[in-house]
Amino acid sequence: MSFNTFGRVFRFTTWGESHGPAIGAVVDGCPPGLAILEADLQPFLDKRRPGTSRFTTQRQEPDQVRILSGVFEGRTTGTPISLMIENVDQRSKDYSEVAKAYRPGHADYAYDAKYGIRDYRGGGRSSARETAARVAAGAVARLVIPEVSILGYVSEIGGDAIDMANFDAAEIGNNPFFCPDARAAARWEKLVDEARLAGSSLGAIVECVATGVPAGWGAPIYGKLDADLAAAMMGINAVKAVEIGEGFNAARLRGEENADPMRPGENGPDFEANHAGGIAGGISTGQPVVVRVAFKPTSSILTPVETITREGEATEIVTKGRHDPCVGIRGTPVVEAMTAFVLADHKLLQRAQRGEA
Amino acid sequence: MSFNTFGRVFRFTTWGESHGPAIGAVVDGCPPGLAILEADLQPFLDKRRPGTSRFTTQRQEPDQVRILSGVFEGRTTGTPISLMIENVDQRSKDYSEVAKAYRPGHADYAYDAKYGIRDYRGGGRSSARETAARVAAGAVARLVIPEVSILGYVSEIGGDAIDMANFDAAEIGNNPFFCPDARAAARWEKLVDEARLAGSSLGAIVECVATGVPAGWGAPIYGKLDADLAAAMMGINAVKAVEIGEGFNAARLRGEENADPMRPGENGPDFEANHAGGIAGGISTGQPVVVRVAFKPTSSILTPVETITREGEATEIVTKGRHDPCVGIRGTPVVEAMTAFVLADHKLLQRAQRGEA
Amino acid sequence: MSFNTFGRVFRFTTWGESHGPAIGAVVDGCPPGLAILEADLQPFLDKRRPGTSRFTTQRQEPDQVRILSGVFEGRTTGTPISLMIENVDQRSKDYSEVAKAYRPGHADYAYDAKYGIRDYRGGGRSSARETAARVAAGAVARLVIPEVSILGYVSEIGGDAIDMANFDAAEIGNNPFFCPDARAAARWEKLVDEARLAGSSLGAIVECVATGVPAGWGAPIYGKLDADLAAAMMGINAVKAVEIGEGFNAARLRGEENADPMRPGENGPDFEANHAGGIAGGISTGQPVVVRVAFKPTSSILTPVETITREGEATEIVTKGRHDPCVGIRGTPVVEAMTAFVLADHKLLQRAQRGEA
Amino acid sequence: MSFNTFGRVFRFTTWGESHGPAIGAVVDGCPPGLAILEADLQPFLDKRRPGTSRFTTQRQEPDQVRILSGVFEGRTTGTPISLMIENVDQRSKDYSEVAKAYRPGHADYAYDAKYGIRDYRGGGRSSARETAARVAAGAVARLVIPEVSILGYVSEIGGDAIDMANFDAAEIGNNPFFCPDARAAARWEKLVDEARLAGSSLGAIVECVATGVPAGWGAPIYGKLDADLAAAMMGINAVKAVEIGEGFNAARLRGEENADPMRPGENGPDFEANHAGGIAGGISTGQPVVVRVAFKPTSSILTPVETITREGEATEIVTKGRHDPCVGIRGTPVVEAMTAFVLADHKLLQRAQRGEA
């Protein structure tokens, strides 16, 4: 089965393939009356847009988003917001080889096993191009939660991590890696260039911190805030792991070390630590929500890899085309978008059950 | 909002609190005609049952599961299967102190912030006691996927990992830790005892491997198999991180290292590696599905921790009661159960869209 | 597939068969802090309870409802409310004949065609006994919408309609037919007695009026208030038709006749008519919501009817057992319950999207 | 809240307003491998298209449907099918008066009460123009259920019913009323012309019969086939009532009269009557599924009606613009489309639970 809709009461549905005429998202359940222009959404798309530096795919896509419905005189009407992004720079000829053989690490074989048919051009529906639609939907979500600030950044590429002592949020926009540590950014330039020129690829770790989330968001037991975030993150192309707060490290701490003591604060408790990553029992605690995500290295590489054809014959494949040497980089705005959407959905859910008391 | 239902077309809904009269699960969408007895479900509950060794809580619960509906003459009828487990050993008096102050690391404060009211007895709805209902539902799910074998085990406690060279599946049932490495089990005995006697607690890592999953299960884009597994795992009490296959390590590999080359096999490809953990593009590849989960150390410890009362006054809390020194251990059958349920749901979804062609 | 859950953000899941040990409902998403006792729910169950007059089935069921979870110190906690009703007077021996042949008009053949297996005792899951669980859930829903009054009544039995000129709401509880017209009630006594003694059965029409529903509830386009009510009603056992407001008669009016003119009122408009039945564009208008439902005559009759056995052989069947001569009567509290639940769900949905501005 | 998605595992999401640039539907969960061209969908849209006779609105819309995704080399791929229809003939100036005052019978007041904002141009999202997207989605659904034939027709306009003795399916396409009775069609020509010229409007009844539905489709208890059909129908603009099979008339029959006796047949039973309308216990019986729907008269009329302005002042309104004198006529292909979609969804659900055994 296919499920191309994300969210519970605030939802978006995406459509479109890498090499079709367009891709899009339909955002449903948006509160009415919010001021919104295409220009409010475009900056987020521009962050994810390919071709802006030599460290991303050279496919040239303006990723201009159009609002086709749900907005009247510059305000949301509460009806579905249809967002469309045209595909401009599809070069289907690049993919003739992919039609014949499965690219290891890609979804080619799995899609064929599932559907018995596959649009092989650029990965079709499985292409990370679909994430542009998520970014557009996430930009709408941000309007729903003005009380929340969401900051995503790359904390590690190819095993080379930032130094949190150098963390500077202002630095994130100053380099092509969404890197908050200027020295790490300088190192990564060489690292990524080397991989790119070698036709290889690198993995990355993206962190995302949401501040301003009030205590009480989350839907126990099977719609917990952390569970919804985990699904949102794991569903992003190339993601293989998700942590909340202390994450895997929590398994190595003792109870005393992992405690988040509380003291009386002005609005609820002041927490003296945030090992929990802002979520306890699946419900936000009022502390920053901290998510960490691992992106695998891009599967498209120039080194020949053994594979099979659709007919089951042995062959080798080299993935030429145009690819990101490190997909995690452009994953950053996608992680932000999905975080925003999950939080907005849970804000609406909380006021469904509680009102605004 | 609350969401106490898990699954898409195959679903279960759980109810009940730690100190109420009973807990239960209603399993809906089960295929009809499956042979099922209470005795088929009980062994799984027995694995999770408390009080079976000194390494788990001393609460004595028989966790006897009753089937109240959906079964006729020993077979499922396709109608909802109501499963009920009575609570026998509730000692509400133990929790008088919890009524007054929030236990750090627990969901106490978050539940109060969310609902404005909280059943403080044993954590109420946020207690891991709820997971017994999941294990019952998961036992039904196993009947739906006889082609799949699911094996969960603890791979690390308090930072002390098993040696995969010693891995012996037969060993898992021979120790109270679900540990497949006899030597590690011996070490853990001391480790957990020490923590237990010190009134401290330890975290753990649980791995789960599902073999026999055919290629093609998973629901792109927003119901991917790995995303559903991630949500299922992250929603388990005390879980803070989830990995599929290579997980976080994938972020440190190069594209060549992370490739899973394919050769012609008898039924589809033979993969030469399984970095992907059996899932590509959110769809199963036919390889073993590999999930890894981090459990934080139990938040209930004897060391006093700073906290606040409901009224916002500063205080300290020591959590006496009866607790697991390492919740990850009994988390193992829960991880298995959730894995089973996700896979069964996706089996049904796949045949919805494809039939059985 | 089976779907035993009703509702969108406020939901209930029912389970149980006519001749199993019990039936129940799990109500999820209930706002926290509502005062609730079993005694608040019981009166609604007592209205639907069988065996209270000679005009209903003689099965003796106390229909005592128990709250097993979700309530603490007399208040809802926002977690799932598990409601259980034990089956007391199952006489499975009555149904031996039903095991062999399909009762025309009943769901026997359809269940077998769907599931390939069927609990034939008293209709199993298809029995109207399941509606007791709906009534319990509906009683919880009423607590969520204290601003709304819901009044159901029988307006017609066997083609004999009430005279609206005689309508007296106080009369509804004075006769065994939920009839607001004392003269009609007197006529129906004879009518139903005659059918009962002849081993025949009668259909009925039930109306339900909800006053106090504010303007703005309803979820366009595919969760319209009237669409959700239509599904809720059509899903009640034996219902074959649903009308909102003018209903079928609207098809015979001209635009001028069907208009509901508005004048300025104190809170929004004063409507001069209510042909719309309180709903326009799937959204409540602030006028009374008016639903009308047709119940077919009970399919269990003493007249022999041609049918086939499970093996496909021709036979005749006479349905003895214990049955309502007119199921529509006891359908009244079920119609009320479903109306209450739909409205409560939409109240929560509206404040999800709008807040309480 | 808004819910613009219809269906359970086979789903569509619509978007767009009467006077926006376009409207559309995203169809999700479609089985892969189905042959599909835009030319397969267009005939259904042409049936619903406005401006084809003087008996419908004179708005000129080519209603050309484009497939933007989900199809590769003429076959469905199992991924979302995005369908878009451009709005060509919007004349927003016609609606200046509607901006000020609420049109009685329309959703104007209700939308404003719900959302606090409203796109008044042509009714915005509440316009029946949205139903073009349903027809496109329904055309896809037909491809999923080739075993089923769906036939909709108008059986009554303005209280003037067809004579079933004259029923001729071939006649339906020969007149602008989808009327299977040539004599009734002749009468309706005068009837509708008279109403049209008088600036008045008429209601209608549409019947829809689906043959070839196998026994066993439907999802008890809260996704019954008849309940889903009822919601699907009641959610169509201007619909106020829904019947299955005997419908309201069943309330006036005795049990003996309403029975559908069975005899042994070649594939399951031969039914000797179809009072049930092909559905028992919410599950298809293998007989034709019969649905009947009442459309109210168009609310847009030239007779002045009392109303209020947005500011709550008394005024009168005359709805000029371009309108159907009888919306029920063009409702026919919409009823067919929704019937097709519900049936296709339930086909997939049934094979999810049962496989194709």
Image (cartoon, coloured by chain):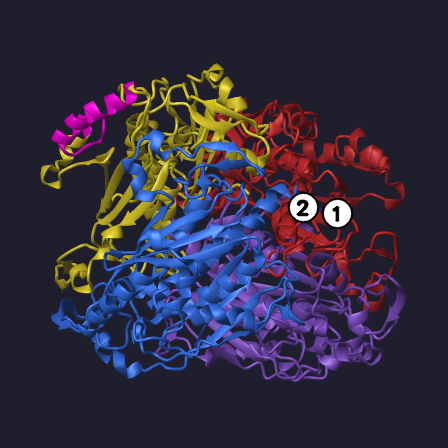
Chain colours: A yellow, B blue, C purple, D red
Tags 2 and 1 touching, CB below 8 Å: yes
The x and y percentages for residue D27 are 56, 36
* Residue A182 is a magenta residue: yes
- Left or right: A261, with D354 as reference point: left
SS category of the residue bearing label 2: helix
Asked if residue C340 can be seen in this view, the reply is no
* Residue D95 is a magenta residue: no
* Residue under pointer 1: D213
* Residue under pointer 2: D343
Give the magenta range: A173-197
Examine the image and state in which quarter residue C156 appears.
Answer: bottom right
- Left or right: D78, with B171 as reference point: right
The x and y percentages for residue C245 are 61, 55
The amino acid sitting under disc 2 is Leu
Q: Is residue D275 above or below residue D356?
A: below
Residue lying farthest to the left in this orientation: A165
Asked if residue C303 can be seen in this view, the reply is yes
